[in-house]
Image (spheres, rainbow, N blue to C red):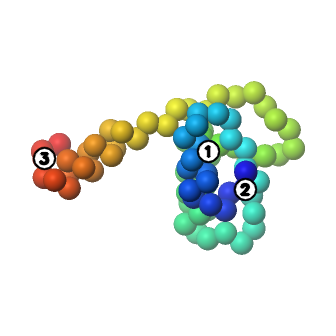
Amino acid sequence: MTNDSVSMLSEAASLGKPLYTLNLEGGSRRLDKFYKNLVEKGLCRPFKGELESWVPKPVDDRAVVLKEIKKKIKIPV
């Protein structure tokens, strides 16, 4: 997968399968920051010509989402 779409990277990372990306030049700072965050969290790796066997960390943002919902509807966190 290329690293030029936040939505494609997000959907692919949520599957819990190894995700390799090809870095395309000319991206935006927003995309670069998002991509770097995925790599740092162990959700994807840049493709460097060889496939490795690895298991990405599971994605579970439910606690973060719940906290934001409670904040928006003014329920003490």
Residue at label 2? 2
Amino acid bearing label 2: Thr
Marks 2 and 3 sit apart, C-alpha to C-alpha, by 40 Å
User: Closer to the N terminus: mark 3 or mark 1?
Assistant: 1
Q: Which residue is mark 1?
A: 12
For the point 57% across and 58% down, which residue is it?
A: 6
Residue at coordinates 55% horizontally, 66% vertically from top-left? Answer: 30
Q: CA distance from mark 2 to mark 1?
A: 11 Å
Residue 75 marker: 3
Are the two marked residues, 2 and 3, in contact with CB atoms closer than 8 angstroms? no
Distance Cα–Cα, label 3 vs label 1? 33 Å
Q: Is residue 24 left or right of residue 38?
A: right
Residue 42 visible in the picture: yes
Left or right: 32, with 26 as reference point: left
Q: For residue 40, say whether it is visible.
A: no
- Residue located 26% across and 45% down the image: 67
Amino acid type, callout 3: Ile
Amino acid type of the residue that numbered disc 1 sits on in the rendered structure? Ala
Element at badge 2? loop
Classify mark 3: residues with Cα within 10 Å, few (<14), some (14-19) or many (20+): few
Residue 42: image quadrant is top right
Q: Secondary structure at mark 1?
A: helix
In the current view of this chain or complex, which residue is farthest to the right? 49
Residue 16 location (% of width, % of height): 59, 33
**Quarter of the image with the C terminus in it:** top left
- Of circles 3 and 1, the one toward us is 1
SS for tag 3?
Answer: loop
Q: Position of residue 13 (x, y in %)?
A: 59, 43
